[in-house]
Amino acid sequence: MRYISTRGQAPVLNFSEAMMTGLARDGGLYVPEVVPVLSKAEISAMAGLSYEDVAFRVMRPYLGSTFTDAEFKGLIAKAYAGFSHAARAPLVQLGPNHFLLELFHGPTLAFKDFAMQLIGQMMQAALAKTGDRITIVGATSGDTGSAAMEAFRGLANVDLFILYPHGRVSDVQRCQMTTPAEANVYALAMDGDFDNCQARVKDMFNDFAFRDGVRLAGVNSINWARVLAQVVYYFYAAVALGAPERSVSFTVPTGNFGDIFAGYIARKMGLPIEQLVIATNQNDILNRAMKTGDYVQNGVTASISPSMDIQVSSNFERALFDAYGRDGAAISALMDELKAGGFHISQGAMGMLRETFASGRCSEAETLATITRAFAETGEVLCPHSAVGVKVAEENLGAAPMITLATAHPAKFPDAVESAMGVRPNLPPRMADLFDRPERVTRVPNDLGALQALIRERIAR
Ligand SMILES: *Cc1c(COP(=O)(O)O)cnc(C)c1O
């Protein structure tokens, strides 16, 4: 399997190289040259299998010769052993034809654990074969950083640096990043906001001397391996509800478009997905783009579903690449326009996007009302991101069963949940002592040179 860049100017890579590279050198994102299609019989055969067995069957065709089958099975087993639910991704029913896929039973209570736990194992195994060491730098608004810390702590061939905006993450998120004691992971609290953090990480990737010098790798959802790991639960859930004989629909609370793009890949692989619904909060650039064809930034407003507060939805570039007939030059031109504020999506590309995706938005008041109502009607406590999904899903119910992705545990966002329900959700018992663990964090300025010096010094230890 070969991987190509959405901008057409970067080297073609194999799976392992694409996983270690993150952002392509032409600024694009890696995608498989050809998406493998599973037969109806292959999909049917997934019924009743464990999450781990489905994971193996869905991902195996993408890996080439990176791992033997036995090695890959071992890595999958390790990745999901720390989840607190035997089903890994259990489905619960919310209404007559509406289901919730709970993706928050991993070690840091958000769906990011599904991909991060696995790529931690895959990167370490690939590096152990060559003896190489890499440096991972990631920016986070909270969940990616905590999932990465948990996945990479203690791994022998990796140093991990997570940049988060000082004072702008929740207490649970901060403690999940600052309390791991292992020497190879570093929490850096940067002056500025999330966009500043992300911009400094991009600067590091664009400084080729630094990038090559420290062997920089990325774990944000620009990394193809992360998207791939998320394709699995679409198959797992759909098969549980009768696919491939019966079609299903999904609604996905969306920020960077990584999670829903995984659903798009599942559909390309042959999973009968009727509707794939983008759910946004008040930061609704994707919903506006779907409705008007104009992808235009108009500033981020902080919301109670902060993991979806985005201005530039990185993975949307992958969908555009297909919508524009895989024309890398056209994508490059659009991304140049985006730097100046936005672009208009061509009529042909809009046709493809609308055929594939529906969309909706959910206001702050609607988010809170949905948390209150879902609890009253079903007893399910939703996090604010999942509530955005449930609200938009309800507007799109049809003949096929609707599956809404629940992206985080309510206790990760206790303030919003408390204001909707009057009761504060408790952390699961295994992390009840989170706030008592010692914190370790370095305050850093929003300054590329200073950050690079700090990273060089720490990895030389
Ligand atoms: C990351 C995240 C999202 C958004 O996912 P994308 O892949 O960026 O679209 C939604 N909800 C939660 C809780 C998240 O952590």
Image (spheres, rainbow, N blue to C red):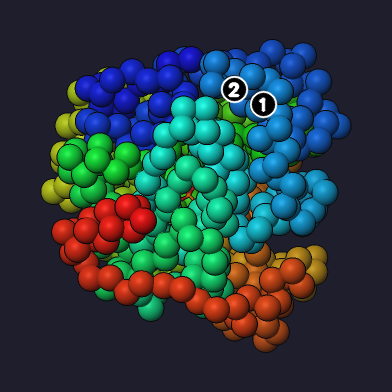
Residue corresponding to mark 1: 71
Q: Quadrant of residue 407?
A: bottom right
In the displayed structure, 40 sits above or below 7; it is: above
64 left or right of 109 in image = left
For the residues labelled 2 and 1, say whether their Cβ atoms are less than 8 Å apart: yes
Whether residue 300 is visible: yes
Q: Residue at x 37, y 46 (%)?
A: 135
Residue at 29% over, 43% down: 214
Instruction: Tell which of 111 and 366 is nearer to you.
Output: 111
- Is 34 positioned to the left or the right of 138 in the image? right
Residue type indicated by callout 1:
Glu
Side of 176 relative to 81 (left or right): left
Number of disc labels? 2
Percent from the top left, x then y, of residue 1? Answer: 48, 15
Q: Viewed as shown, does residue 322 lie left or right of 400? A: left
Residue on which disc 2 sits: 67
Disc 1 residue crowd, few under 14, some 14–19, many 20+, Cα 10 Å: few
Q: Is residue 373 visible?
A: no
Q: Residue furthest front?
A: 461
What residue is shown at x 67% (from left), y 26% (from top)? Answer: 71
